[in-house]
Amino acid sequence: MGAMFGKCFARLRREKLGVSLRQFCRDHNFDPGNISKLERGKLPPPQSRQKLEQYASALGLTEGSDEWYEFFDTAFAERGELPEDLASDEALVGQLPVLFRTLRGDAVAREELEELLNKLRRA
């Protein structure tokens, strides 16, 4: 199991709130054992959007902010999923094979990469 989401969670808790894990859990009525496991990558990111929103709110994240997207995107990425807003964009999803080939180091035509970048900028 990865720990990207857990590291993101712990960093945001420390940087945004400046509180210990136990204090955070006391303040928001979370189980410290579960949050500890989550932060250490021993538990996967929650499947429930409602639970992710509850955590994001407790961390003081503003919906639509860069930190909000980082938090949610990291959860989706660690679960091997596309964020809902991007998964519903058929044109963007159709370009993902170009991204995957690029990430694998395969040669991809410059035009394909430029088309993908343009779609990502518009998303």
Image (cartoon, rainbow, N blue to C red):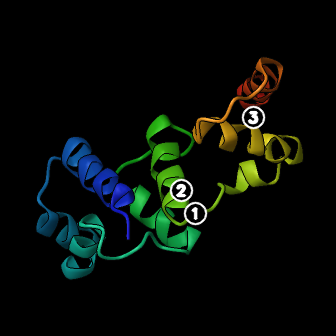
Which mark sits nearer the N-terminus, 2 or 3? 2
Amino acid, disc 2: Ala
Amino acid, disc 1: Gly
**Mark closer to the observer (2, 3):** 2
26 sits to left or right of 80: left
32 sits to left or right of 45: left
Which residue in the structure is indicated by mark 2? 77
Which residue in the structure is indicated by mark 3? 123
Can you tell which mark lies on residue 80? 1
Q: Going 49% across and 35% down the picture, which residue do you hit?
A: 66
Residue in the foreground of this view, choosing between 55 and 72 = 72
Amino acid, disc 3: Ala
Estimate how packed mark 3 is, as few (under 14), some (14 to 19) or many (20 or more) residues with alpha carbons within 10 Å: few
Estimate how packed mark 1 is, as few (under 14), some (14 to 19) or many (20 or more) residues with alpha carbons within 10 Å: few
Secondary structure under tag 2 reads helix
Q: How far apart are marks 1 and 2 (CA)?
A: 5 Å
Contact (CB < 8 A) between labels 1 and 3?
Answer: no
The relative height of residue 95 versus residue 48 in the rendered view (above or below) is above
